[in-house]
Image (cartoon, rainbow, N blue to C red):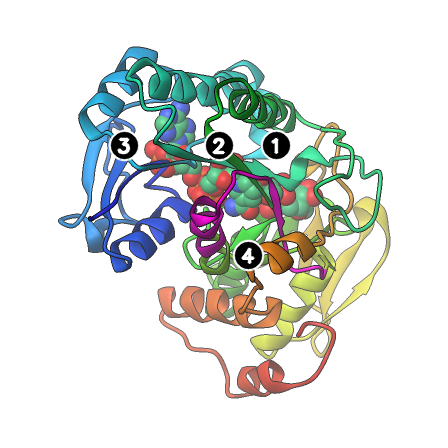
């Protein structure tokens, strides 16, 4: 029998990859779309006629219940969220409504229509829960210490999922996903901001890149690898929570260094703090500067995930390396401005180094 899946956040990075993945598996795919004054479906335009879209919002309970009653999904993937950490400091209440209480609304919608014993539920939890890290690397048992309104809202969502699993025996699981990126990543997240700005610098339409905390370290994987794991989590015998990560970390400075090396304009770093600059090794041109504007009131300095449980219980491991991910994103952004990557980028891709 053909399975039915409902994806909230289908127009986002992960939603679009997950929809493709589930269609390939033969699922009937439904998604919740927010009304917008302009088109917001660019990531799913290529599969538009294959998915079923319903207008809705995680802040509207009755709408969620009526979608649930109509679709009666076998699997629900809750990916919708105000997902930007810095923005959550400016919109804390809305972030709590959408990311925290929104998860509760969706779980209640499942119960309201009597699907709690049959529908499986995936929650997009996050490494941001670890915040001020209490253990390195982070695993499923590492204590949480959220450091933003976003992370606090996601903490509520994490625990309400655990509670509904225990209280109502729902098949409800948390994927504690570390940062994952792709050419479809939103332009205000640091990887995409850097790859697209580097392409603009190469085109000559931008002089330099302004960034916040260059010391921040992240465990960056590829979104395609991570949506596969979302599905795997709902296919196992029992609901459970899993860390999904690569167990490798790089700083924002490493990311910028690699990108400029790939486009053939290596940078060296000079100065410190707000005065730190990334300078073209040959010409001395300033290509990167630090701007306070991108600092967060409380920062998550370092994240590194241990995906051993996902490997042992589900046989999952990431297939795309950090370097391959950045190459793919840069290639896409260079194309966007009518350029291509120099031949040397392929050599960097093949080289054995710390970015493998
Ligand atoms: P995106 O920001 O790319 O996508 C978010 C999606 O949620 C979009 O489809 C957006 O719609 C939708 N959305 C936002 N608010 C609402 C709302 N109130 N009601 C309904 N839909 C809404 O995020 P990602 O794809 O990167 O991430 C997916 C999920 O995984 C998010 O919950 C995120 O917090 C979480 N996560 C992401 C990680 C990552 O590194 N990418 C890591 C760990 C967790 P619209 O297109 O209209 O804006
Ligand atoms: P993050 O991703 O906050 O980890 O949340 P983001 O790419 O925004 O930041 C990563 C780190 O880079 C530093 N940084 C900058 N960040 C942005 N956006 N812009 C800058 O100019 C900049 N300069 C430095 C940040 O301070 C931070 O330390 C992402 C989101 O997808 C969440 O939804 C998800 O839960 C987590 O990843 C895991």
Q: How many marks?
A: 4
Mark nearer the N terminus (3 vs 2) = 3
Residue 17 x, y percent position in the rendering:
37, 53
**Mark seen at residue 33:** 3
Q: Residue at x 65, y 60 (%)?
A: 246
Which type of secondary structure does the marked residue at label 4 adopt? helix
Residue placed under numbered mark 1 in the picture = 86
Residue placed under numbered mark 2 in the picture = 172
Of labels 1 and 4, the one closer to you: 4
Q: Can see residue 200?
A: yes
- Real-space CA distance between mark 4 and mark 2, rounded to the nearest whole angstrom: 16 Å
Residue 303 x, y percent position in the rendering:
73, 47
Point out the stretch of residues depicted in magenta.
227-248
**Mark seen at residue 13:** none
* Crowd class of label 2 (few under 14; some 14 to 19; many from 20; radius 10 Å): many
**Mark seen at residue 314:** 4
Which type of secondary structure does the marked residue at label 3 adopt? strand
Q: Residue at x 59, y 69 (%)?
A: 321
Find the residue positioned furthest to the left.
Answer: 49
Which type of secondary structure does the marked residue at label 2 adopt? strand
- Real-space CA distance between mark 2 and mark 1, rounded to the nearest whole angstrom: 28 Å
- Real-space CA distance between mark 1 and mark 4, rounded to the nearest whole angstrom: 33 Å
Q: Is residue 231 magenta?
A: yes
Q: Is residue 263 magenta?
A: no
Residue 192 x, y percent position in the rendering:
51, 54
């Amino acid at each position: 029998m053909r399975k039915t899946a409902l994806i909230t956040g289908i127009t986002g990075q992960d939603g679009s990859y997950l929809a493709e993945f589930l269609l390939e598996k033969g699922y009937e795919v439904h998604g919740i779309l927010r009304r917008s004054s302009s088109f917001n479906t660019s990531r799913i335009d290529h599969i538009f006629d294959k998915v079923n879209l319903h207008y809705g919002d995680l802040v509207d309970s009755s709408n969620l219940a009526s979608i649930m009653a109509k679709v009666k999904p076998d699997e629900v993937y809750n990916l919708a969220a105000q997902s930007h950490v810095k923005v959550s400091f400016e919109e804390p209440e809305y972030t709590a409504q959408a990311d925290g209480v929104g998860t509760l609304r969706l779980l209640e919608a499942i119960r309201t229509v009597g699907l709690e014993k049959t529908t499986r539920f995936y929650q997009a939890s996050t490494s941001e829960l670890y915040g001020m890290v209490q253990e390195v690397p982070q695993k499923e048992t590492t204590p949480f210490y959220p450091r933003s309104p976003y992370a606090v809202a996601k903490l509520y969502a994490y625990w309400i999922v655990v509670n509904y699993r225990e209280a109502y025996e729902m098949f409800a699981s948390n994927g504690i996903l570390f940062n994952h990126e792709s050419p479809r990543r939103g332009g205000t997240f640091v990887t995409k901001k850097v790859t697209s700005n580097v392409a603009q610098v190469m085109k000559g339409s931008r002089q330099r890149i302004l960034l916040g905390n260059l010391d921040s370290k992240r465990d960056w994987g590829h979104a395609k690898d991570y949506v596969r794991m979302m599905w795997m989590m709902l296919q196992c015998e029992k609901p459970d929570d899993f860390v999904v990560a690569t167990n490798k970390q790089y700083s924002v400075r490493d990311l910028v260094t690699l990108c400029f090396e790939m486009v053939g304009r290596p940078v060296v770093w000079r100065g410190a703090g707000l005065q730190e600059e990334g300078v073209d090794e040959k010409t001395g041109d300033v290509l990167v500067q630090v701007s306070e504007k991108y600092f967060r009131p409380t920062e998550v300095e370092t994240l590194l995930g241990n995906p051993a449980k996902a490997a042992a219980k589900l046989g999952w491991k990431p297939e795309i390396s950090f370097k391959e991910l950045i190459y793919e994103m840069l290639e896409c952004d260079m194309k966007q401005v009518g350029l291509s990557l120099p031949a040397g980028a392929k050599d960097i891709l093949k080289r054995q180094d710390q970015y493998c």
